[in-house]
Image: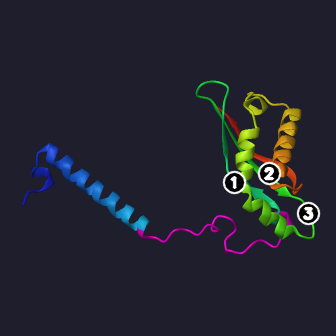
Amino acid sequence: MLRDADLPPHDRRRSALRGLLGGAMLALAAVTALPPAPAWAGEGGGGQKSEDPEVLRKIKMNPMLLPGKDRFSYVRLQVMLVVRMSKHLNEEVDTVTNLKPRINGELTEALTVDHVSRRSLSTADVQALKGRIMEVANEAVGKPLVDEVLIVSLLVG
């Protein structure tokens, strides 16, 4: 049997690559063997809804990609909707949560690039954007359930 020092250089590289490839395959097998993480794992754990109304009423929306003014430009907007406080908070939060895809689609259609495509937005521009998002979200739900809009991230690229 030949040792690595006795092998030609290209064979040494090949054996090193085999070792790396074997390690990568072992790591991949270990990762795929793990059960998938539950959907609630990243949101406080335990699988139970929070009892705190301030936590319960905030609904995080999926990021929206809007086309920009230029050819390859875009705007990435992520918001959090705050449901109004009421006696039926759980039902209203469930209603808004169930309608998230519809709200996201309506917002994508309603928000034009002119609202958010400038590189410098004033406070009035941000407040107008938040008002427009709240208006469209309430129209999509059919009732005025959204009380406030929090902008999580706004990237113009």
Residue range (magenta) = 33-55
Secondary-structure class at tag 1: helix
Residue 127 place in picture, x, y as percent: 87, 39
Reading the image, the residue beneath label 2 is 140
Counting every numbered tag in the picture gives 3
Asked where in the image residue 87 lies, by quadrant, the reply is bottom right
Circle nearer the viewer, 1 or 3: 1
Separation of disc 3 and disc 2 at Cα?
A: 19 Å
Reading the image, the residue beneath label 3 is 85
Residue 54 place in picture, x, y as percent: 85, 64
Residue 4 place in picture, x, y as percent: 15, 53
Q: Specify which label sits upstream in the sequence, 1 or 3.
A: 3
Residue sticking out furthest to the top: 70
Residue 14 place in picture, x, y as percent: 19, 49
Separation of disc 1 and disc 2 at Cα?
A: 10 Å
Q: Crowding at label 2, few (<14), some or many (≥20) Cα neighbours within 10 Å? A: many
**Residue type highlighted by circle 3:** Met
Question: Which numbered circle lies on residue 101?
Answer: 1
Q: Quadrant of the N terminus?
A: bottom left
Secondary-structure class at tag 3: loop
As for residue 49 lying within the magenta part, the answer is yes
Secondary-structure class at tag 2: helix
Separation of disc 1 and disc 3 at Cα?
A: 22 Å
Please, is residue 104 above or below residue 114 in the view?
below
Asked where in the image residue 76 lies, by quadrant, the reply is top right
Q: Majority secondary structure of the magenta segment?
A: loop
